[in-house]
Structure formats: structure tokens, C-alpha cells
Amino acid sequence: MRIVISGASGSIGTALSEHLGRKGHDVVRLVRRPPADTGEASWDPATGQLDEAVLDGADAVINLSGAGIGARRWTKARVRELIDSRLQSTKTLTAAMARLATPPGTFLSQSASGYYGSSRTGVLREDSGAGKGMLAELCVDWEAAAHTAPPGVRVVTPRTGVVLSPEGGALGPLLPLVKWGLGGPLGNGRQYWPWISLIDEVSAFEYLLDSPLEGPVNVCAPESADVNAIVAQLAAALHRPAFLRVPSPALRLVLGGQLAEELILANQRMEPAKLMDSGFSWQHPALVDAARWVASGGK
């Protein structure tokens, strides 16, 4: 397949691009600079610039673009950047597809577990409906932008949870702290995080390229786990203690109240119902397996 990927320089994008390349696919990475080789093509999503010829003949487009959700405090300017970086990128891609006589057959456009809001109870499946908060509103608009793809394009909006990676990934500074024996639960630790290993995240995207699934797809492991369990399993796999709990008020003070509530303290017991029903197979379906994989450096 010929696959065009935006956001290919991020942790998920890098792993996915390399994996698909090893599988023999022709991967084209969109970059915001002059192309370094034939595997790259330039674009400027901020101004909506993308030569539709880049997408001509592509079988699929994968959209992973977006500024890091937890990289900085959520000032008004940063929130605007989080929104614009996602909506502008998505609309630039769908507009380019619409200019083609034969657009790509599949459009995988990243969404997030934030769609469900920060304080939901019960199990969250793809039909559970949107929650409240900035992230929920962003994900609703993000998915709607993906569906502006032209008729005939199969649109999939993977709602990804916390991706566990040996390099840290969505765990950010937590993983180094656990490695140093300075880690511990965040808040009361009873909030559910929908987690998945990086290798299963990549496999899920590869699976969705050929699967008939469309619309929202929860991308997480089938085993639910709260923050207490996630930190405890990582610490056990690394043979480190994990007892230095970070209280909720401290998180709100350091990160800002909105970011802490919607990202770190959010309770989202997400279930990958569509992936399970369609027969997708996880390499790390259990948290203990994923933690050992992370501790081993991905070996």
C-alpha cells in the first residue's frame, strides 16, 4: 500500500512509519520543511497548503498531527494551539482529498480518549457519547473535521488512550521517576486510564488500514487498570518502589487545574469494543505483560 502519514515525527508516528516500511509499504511522511528524500513531502497545515498530487495514488492517509496535549500548561494561547494544530491539519488533508478525482480509500484520523470527558463512570464504549470539558469538545470537532473527507473515503477516528513506551511516551516524566524509585500514584490513584503498549498501538493502526471498521474505534488494551495498578506494575517490572504519591492539589498547582483534571486525574474506563468484536489480537493484553515490555526497553 502507498500510505501518507502526517505527524510522523512523534512517538507513535515514528514507530508506525518504521513498522509499515518494514512490512513493505510505500510510506510518505508529511513534513513542514523541504523534503529530505523521496519518502517525504512538504506541507503547511497552518495555511492549508498541501499539493493534492502528494495524495494521488495513495491507498490510505493517516493523520497523527497535533501539538502535545500535556507538554505545557494550558494557557489560553496553548489551548488555541492544541485546537488549531489538530483541526487545521485534518481539514488540510480532507480538502486535498476532495480535489482528487479518486481520493484515497481510507482515512485514519487520530482522536483521543479525551472524547469521553474527565469524570465519567461505568465502561465507555464507542457509543457512550461525548463527555464535557476542553478535550471532549476538541475531540468532537476533530472527529467532525475528519468526516469532511469526500464521499467514498472510509473514515476511522481511533480514540487512543495512554500509550506505554520504553521511551516514556504518554507517561512523560512519570516513567523516569519510577525508574529512579521516586514514582507513585497521581492523586488518589483510583482513576482509570485506558492504556495500551506502543507496539499494540502500531498494530491496531495497521489492522485498521485493512479492516472494514469505520467511525470511532477505542484503541486501548482489553484489561482495565487504574493509576495505582499502572504505577505498581511498572515499578514491579523495574524492581523499584513506588510509594511517593503526588496529591491532587499539588498536581493542580504544578500543572494547572484544567490540565490536571482533564488529563492526569481523568477517570476513563474505556473498552475497545469494536477491536474485540472484530477479532483484533493484542501482543500485550494484560498490564503485567506491557509493564515487562516497557521495563525491558521494548525487547
Image (spheres, rainbow, N blue to C red):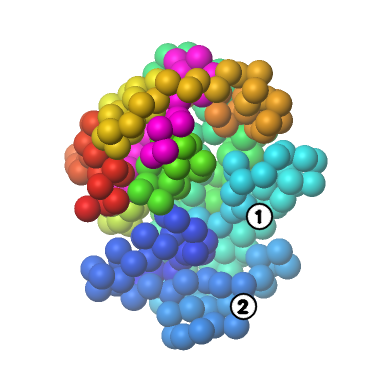
Mark 2 is on which residue type? Arg
Residue 43 drawn above or below residue 205: below
| Magenta highlight on residue 264 | no
* Residue 258 falls in image quadrant: top right
Residue 154 visible in the displayed image: yes
Residue 147 located left or right of residue 17: right
Residue 261 in the image, given as x and y percentages of width and height: 62, 24
Residue at the farthest right position: 76
Q: How far from the left and from the top, in percent, is residue 97?
A: 54, 67
Give the extent of the magenta segment: 179-200
- Of the pair 19 and 155, the residue shown nearer to us: 19
For the residues labelled 1 and 2, say whether their Cβ atoms are less than 8 Å apart: no
- Helix, strand or loop at disc 2? loop
Residue, x 64% and y 39% (percent of image)?
138
The amino acid sitting under disc 1 is: Ser
Q: Residue at x 22, y 53 (%)?
A: 299
Residue drawn at point x = 61 percent, y = 59 percent: 89
Q: Which residue is mark 2?
A: 33
Whole-percent x and y of residue 224?
A: 33, 24
Quadrant housing the N terminus = bottom left
To which residue does mark 1 refer? 85
- Along the line of sight, the residue nearer the viewer: 246 or 151: 246
In whole angstroms, how far apart are the C-alphas of marks 1 and 2? 16 Å
Instruction: Decide: is 142 above or below 255.
Output: below
Within 10 Å of the Cα at label 1, are there few (<14), some (14-19), or many (20+) other Cα atoms?
some
Identity of the residue drawn at 47% across and 72% down: 29
Q: Return the disc, 1 or 2, that comes first in the chain's sequence.
A: 2
Q: Residue furthest bottom?
A: 37
